[in-house]
């Protein structure tokens, strides 16, 4: 009973129970609306939203999952997997991206395991966010040099909530990003190659960690 | 023209960069220094001036910023050189926008476009200006110019969107759509379309004109632009159905379901098409997009039996096929589809309830353990008769022996059984308790026969299953968490029925207990106080917010509300949990923060929304353009927003009412309340939006206006979250209409009181006495009308009540408004003398006496009724607070105004009309004395309650839950829950949490929470006493 459809502004008023959940970040309006204005295909909703974008140059052209969350009532039904698969599909088929990535707190072992194998009992994910947005130009909403005030998400982190009993998501840890979350905790950049990356080069893990400054796609 | 390489606004980029860097890093002083240096070199550069204006604006020097930008604008206009570049203009635009002078920015771009008519960059800038001003017609004209200039598809679509906006959000007639269609048609014929969003807009234009056939034709021609197949099919299905081609539409929906078999919305469309029922498409415009209805409308009667049978058979076969084709155990749609088919059959009269019940049973055996089971089946239960619902529940219970062997699944199923009982309403029909003899201890999950045991069972089930959550991460939801919310709801029901306060306390304790279990502990077993860790289980917190509010421990309610972390859009959807209570509380600081944060969020969105709309234009996501503008309008018409806009100045007026000078400066900042009068006039014709999330409210208060606990229990058998929008809308309108008159009436009352003593003396710029009188009279007339009376009748009512000839009941729920009316009436009468005057010696009835006696009666009555504050939920405290902080405070202002005008000070002449012999002077003196005495009474009452020992209060609370009869069973379980902890079974975290549980601690928190509210109120009273005493002192010197 899941209608996956494009997210619209009114959905912001419909998902109060999802947003009240402490694992889900409630972003500011310009954050949501910038995604809607720029990447509406990467912003879908079932019983909770998934949002992302496509960015990068050359072989770095990739889909990025910014946040995915499922309403508590509908967890343990593989909905997060469905939403992730949708974004992977759009990155693969529409935007012909090389890979999809997702960032996760290094301490969040259950979520990491889930993205890798998806076989963790009674665990799942609620939210993944990308605070590195503060360093990207993606949130500059007008052709001015004044920042629009869209603050980087403070909470971040994929955290366990929903079980994905047989979900095979197939992400690998590509690299560690030092002090990625609010300058405190390291983040892990997890990736999954898409069909365009025939040799799966995008998934060969980097040996050395990087700093948030090195994450430039635009 | 334009910026040449390395030049910014005609200035080398290297000279400008340090300024922007300093602005970006908020080093404004440094930026200003660089800017001064730059201006020394380029004194007539508009760009250099614009930069200075940006800095000044950011420093908060708005006037200077405006004047510098106007200089820059003037130079731009004068300057014939080629420095009219987009960078200068966009920089100026930023400043003008931030200074709320969008028109100036627009005129700059307009001027530039006039000068360089073929410059696309400037035209885009101008278009952007019109987007910011929401000038849809101008947007259209500019976009058409750009389209004509370069022939690009995107500019045509900008124009088309602007046309659509005129129709949907402006005054444009639907004929304009035909124009848009023509433009698109012509373009498609010569250039086709290249953007998926362009196609979406084209189809929406045709759909809005009901040209479904044309839309389908375009879709078949250009559909390949839509990359997501299902999106295209959905569009096709909808168009076919709206065209009335149900058979073809059903085929399309079938296709979608084959691609994505869990798409419930699509299944409903599929079935509607098979049954040739267009209701799901027709109602789209009138449905509330936020609060969706549980019940799915359908039309069935038009089909013959035969046709109905064959179509339903098709649907059944298709559903069977979907079920057979999937190996995914989580797919609910095909099984729900079965239920929907049975529901339609039942509505058509093809089967009886038993078949639907049977299907529900099957659904339970498959999905009964899921948390969403109850909400899944709610719409199907709605069509069953009450008897059948009960029968269904009994059947479920009868089946309970066959619950899953897997503990987590079995727990899920048991919870579902309880939820179904709650949903059907049978829970509320249970007796409170049955006699001990007939009480049979029933094993899980069979439901108890009485309400109290129900709550006990829920708590015990929760405790018994705690070990299941042993290994869960602290942040994960625990198994069976909803049991505590349910138990708390049952306990409130028990309180409602028995008025036994102990149940109410237990309802609180259960939730506090649940929150402790989810609390993080750090070294030394101390509870973590980081705030974030206390944030789990928002459901408990919301219930506590309401329970504590009802109990008068509002500061505690507010704490839990803050712990919800309701930021950004949540402020619009969840503020209703606390805001209405706060508005009538003495917690002014907290209320102020709430209002400021909320208004800031909304206003910020209104400011930035146009920029985001332009972003959507730029990225060619045209459908989002329309959506963003409509969404902004939706928020602007939010009932809560309008309410907050009125309540915020009223709070300021309340806070400053003890000092007339401060009050006058507040009124000055409010332009003497003139704007609010306009709001009062407008509100009647505005259609308001209700964006609040009602679902999360407790059953006993489905909207802020409704509280089932206040009235006598009348057998609430089923408390649905009714759609109370209409009732709410009328109420909000009424409140905003009245409250927005207040600032002006307060202003006029002060003026009137002072004019009454000035005897034609006019202060520069002040209104003439006559104008004050006539305007105040007019507003009193309006106010009376809102109360349902003519002015003269309303005057009679207040006089009647004050003399005791009429009962207070006449005021009904509008008591505060009536007293406000009396206060303003008195102020008006001081100057107009139209109602009555005291005798020469100051004795006899006069409007002063009316106000004084009304206030006295109301206030003393409330004090008298609240002997035991601690145990009387929802006492009269909020209305007492309102009486003192609203009508009494305004009355105090009138008195302050009288006294001030009587004082022989400075240049003012001593007024002949106000010697100590004058009757007015007597009356004012008596009034001050009477009101001061009244507030002292309130303060005395407050001190009595504040000073009561904590032990005494604790005893009252504990004795309510430690009884031989009635409440106490839950409390006892909670009190002893940490006596025997099996750490191996529960794990370290839960064990530690249990150990830290202290019911006494909760009771103490409540006592302190209530005391905080009383102390805040006492502070307000004391300030009023001080102000009134000062007045008395001043009067003595007159």
Image (cartoon, coloured by chain):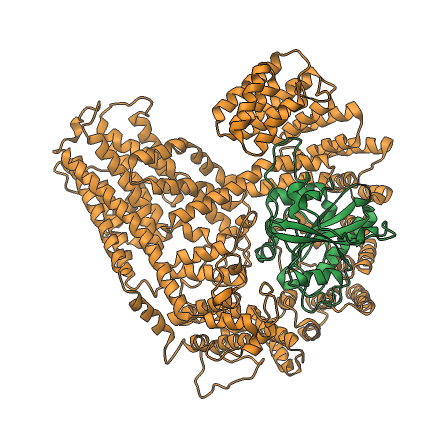
Chain colours: A green, B orange
For image coordinates 35% across by 36% down, the residue present is B745
Camera-side residue of B84 and B115 = B84
- In the image, B556: left or right of B357? left
**Can you tell which quarter of the image residue A46 is in?**
bottom right
Q: Position of residue B688 (x, y in %)?
A: 54, 44
Q: Position of B285 compared to B563: left or right?
A: right
> Residue, x 68% and y 44% (percent of image)?
A35
Q: Quadrant of the C terminus of chain B?
A: top left
**Residue B606 coordinates in the image, percent (x, y):** 57, 38
- Numbered label tally: 0
B858 vs B574, left or right, is: left
| Quadrant (top left/top right/bottom left/bottom right) for the N terminus of chain B | top right
Can residue B790 be seen in the rendering of this structure?
A: no
**Image location (x, y in percent) of residue B763:** 29, 23
| Residue farthest bottom in this picture | B437
- Towards the viewer: B195 or B596: B596
- B104 or B313: nearer the eye? B104
Q: Residue B480: tell me if it is visible.
A: yes
Picture layout, residue B144 above or below residue B586 = above
Q: Position of residue B608 (x, y in %)?
A: 59, 37
Q: Is residue B709 above or below residue B778?
A: below
Q: Quadrant of residue B336?
A: bottom right
């Amino acid at each position: 009973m899941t209608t996956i459809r494009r997210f619209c502004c009114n959905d912001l008023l419909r998902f109060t129970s999802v947003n009240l959940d402490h694992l889900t970040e409630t972003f500011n309006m310009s954050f949501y609306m910038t995604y809607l204005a720029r990447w509406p295909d990467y912003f879908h909703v079932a019983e909770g939203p998934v949002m992302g974008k496509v960015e990068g140059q050359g072989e770095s052209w990739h889909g990025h999952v910014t946040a995915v969350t499922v309403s508590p009532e509908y967890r343990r039904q593989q909905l997060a997997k469905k939403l992730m698969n949708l974004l992977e599909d759009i990155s693969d088929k529409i935007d012909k991206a090389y890979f999809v990535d997702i960032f996760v707190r290094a301490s969040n072992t259950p979520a990491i395991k889930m993205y890798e194998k998806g076989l963790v009992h009674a665990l799942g994910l609620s939210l993944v966010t990308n605070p590195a947005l503060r360093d990207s130009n993606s949130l500059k909403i007008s052709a001015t040099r004044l920042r629009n005030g869209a603050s980087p998400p403070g909470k971040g982190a994929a955290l366990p909530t929903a079980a994905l009993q047989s979900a095979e998501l197939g992400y690998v840890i590509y690299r560690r990003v030092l002090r990625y979350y609010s300058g405190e905790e390291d983040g892990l950049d997890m990736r999954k190659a898409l069909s365009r990356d025939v040799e799966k080069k995008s998934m060969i893990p980097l040996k050395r960690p990087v700093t948030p400054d090195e994450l430039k796609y635009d | 023209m334009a910026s040449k390489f390395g030049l910014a606004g005609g200035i080398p980029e290297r000279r400008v960069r340090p300024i922007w860097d300093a602005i970006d890093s908020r080093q404004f002083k440094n930026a200003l220094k660089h800017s001064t240096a730059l201006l020394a070199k380029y004194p007539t550069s508009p760009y250099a001036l614009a930069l200075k204006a940006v800095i000044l604006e950011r420093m908060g020097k708005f006037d200077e910023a405006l004047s510098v930008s106007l200089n820059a604008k003037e130079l731009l206009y004068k300057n014939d050189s080629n420095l009219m570049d987009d960078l200068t203009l966009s920089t100026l635009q930023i400043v003008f926008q931030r200074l709320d002078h969008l028109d100036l920015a627009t005129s700059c771009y307009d001027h530039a476009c006039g000068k360089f008519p073929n410059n696309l960059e400037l035209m885009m800038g101008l278009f952007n200006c019109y987007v910011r001003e929401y000038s849809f017609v101008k947007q259209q004209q500019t976009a058409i110019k750009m389209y004509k200039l370069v022939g690009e598809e995107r500019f045509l679509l900008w124009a088309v969107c602007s046309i659509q906006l005129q129709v949907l959000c402006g005054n444009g007639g639907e004929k304009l759509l035909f124009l848009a269609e023509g433009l698109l048609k012509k373009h498609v014929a010569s250039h086709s379309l290249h953007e998926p969003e362009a196609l979406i807009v084209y189809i929406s234009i045709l759909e809005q004109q009901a040209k479904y056939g044309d839309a389908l034709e375009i879709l078949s021609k250009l559909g390949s632009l839509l990359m997501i197949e299902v999106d295209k099919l959905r569009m096709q299905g909808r168009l076919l159905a709206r065209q009335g081609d149900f058979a073809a539409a059903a085929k399309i929906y079938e296709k979608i379901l084959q691609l994505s078999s869990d798409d419930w919305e699509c299944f409903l469309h599929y079935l509607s098409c098979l049954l040739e029922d267009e209701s799901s498409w027709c109602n789209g415009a009138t449905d509330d997009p936020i609060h969706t209805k549980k019940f799915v409308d359908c039309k069935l009667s038009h089909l013959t039996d035969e046709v109905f049978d064959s179509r339903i058979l098709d649907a059944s076969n298709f559903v069977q096929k979907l079920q057979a084709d999937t190996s995914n155990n989580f797919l609910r749609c095909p099984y729900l589809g079965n239920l929907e088919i049975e529901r339609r059959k039942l509505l058509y009269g093809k089967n009886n309830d038993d078949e639907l019940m049977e299907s529900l049973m099957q659904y339970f055996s498959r999905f009964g353990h899921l948390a969403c089971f109850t909400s899944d089946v709610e719409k199907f239960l709605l069509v069953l008769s009450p008897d059948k619902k009960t029968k269904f529940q009994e059947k479920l219970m009868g089946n309970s022996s066959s619950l899953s062997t897997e503990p987590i699944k079995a727990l899920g199923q048991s919870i579902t059984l309880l939820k179904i009982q709650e949903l059907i309403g049978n829970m509320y029909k249970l007796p409170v308790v049955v006699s001990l003899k007939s009480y049979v201890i029933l094993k899980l999950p069979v439901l108890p026969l009485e309400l109290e045991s129900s709550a006990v069972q829920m708590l015990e089930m929760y405790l018994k299953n705690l070990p299941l959550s042993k290994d869960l991460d602290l942040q994960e939801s625990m198994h069976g968490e909803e049991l505590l919310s349910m138990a708390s709801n049952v306990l409130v029901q028990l309180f409602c029925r028995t008025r036994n306060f102990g149940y109410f306390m237990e309802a609180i304790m259960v939730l506090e207990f649940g929150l402790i279990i989810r609390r993080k502990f750090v070294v030394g077993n101390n509870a973590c106080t980081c705030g974030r860790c206390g944030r789990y289980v928002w459901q408990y917190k919301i219930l506590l917010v309401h329970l504590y509010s009802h109990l008068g421990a509002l500061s505690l309610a507010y704490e839990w509300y803050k712990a919800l972390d309701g930021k950004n859009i949540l402020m619009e959807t969840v503020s209703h949990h606390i805001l209405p209570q706060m508005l009538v509380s003495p917690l002014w600081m907290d209320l102020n923060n709430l209002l400021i944060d909320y208004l800031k969020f909304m206003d910020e969105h209104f400011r930035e929304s146009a920029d985001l709309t332009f972003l959507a234009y730029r990225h060619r996501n045209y459908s989002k353009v329309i959506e963003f503008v409509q969404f902004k309008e939706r928020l602007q018409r939010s009932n809560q927003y309008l309410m907050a806009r009125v309540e915020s100045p009223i709070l300021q007026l309340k806070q400053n009412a003890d000092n007339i000078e401060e009050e006058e400066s507040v009124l000055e900042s409010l332009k003497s309340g003139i704007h609010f009068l306009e709001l009062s006039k407008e509100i009647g014709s505005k259609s308001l939006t209700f964006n609040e999330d009602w679902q999360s409210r407790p059953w006993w208060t489905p909207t802020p206006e409704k509280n089932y606990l206040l009235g006598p229990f009348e057998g609430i058998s089923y408390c649905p979250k009714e759609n109370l929008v209409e009732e709410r809308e009328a109420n909000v309108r009424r409140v905003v209409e009245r409250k927005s008159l207040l600032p002006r009436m307060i202003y006029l009352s002060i003026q009137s009181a002072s004019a009454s003593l000035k005897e034609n003396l006019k202060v520069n710029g002040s209104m003439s006495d006559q104008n004050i009188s006539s305007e105040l009279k007019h507003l009193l007339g309006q106010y009376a009308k809102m109360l349902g009376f003519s002015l003269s009748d309303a005057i009679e009512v207040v006089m009647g009540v004050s003399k005791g000839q009429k009962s207070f009941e006449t005021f009904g729920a509008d008591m505060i408004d009536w007293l406000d009316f009396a206060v303003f009436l008195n102020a008006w009468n001081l100057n107009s003398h139209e109602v009555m005057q005291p005798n020469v010696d100051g004795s006899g009835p006069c409007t002063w006496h009316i106000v004084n006696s009304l206030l006295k009666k109301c206030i003393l009555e409330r004090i008298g009724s609240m002997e035991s504050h601690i145990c009387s939920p929802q006492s009269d405290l909020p209305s007492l607070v309102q009486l003192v902080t609203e009508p009494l405070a305004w009355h105090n202002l009138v008195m302050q105004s009288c006294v001030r005008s009587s004082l022989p000070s400075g240049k003012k002449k001593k007024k002949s009309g106000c010697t100590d012999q004058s009757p007015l002077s007597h009356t004012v003196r008596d009034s001050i004395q009477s009101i001061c005495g009244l507030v002292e009474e309130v303060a005395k009452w407050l001190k009595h309650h504040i000073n009561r020992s904590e032990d005494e209060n604790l005893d009252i609370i504990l004795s309510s839950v430690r009884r031989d009869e009635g409440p106490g069973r839950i409390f006892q379980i909670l009190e002893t829950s940490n006596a025997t902890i099996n750490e191996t079974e529960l794990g370290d975290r839960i064990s530690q949490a249990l150990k830290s549980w202290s019911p006494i601690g909760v009771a103490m928190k409540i006592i302190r929470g209530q005391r905080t509210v009383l102390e805040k109120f006492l502070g307000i009273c004391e300030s009023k006493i001080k102000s009134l005493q000062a007045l008395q002192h001043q009067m003595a010197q007159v």
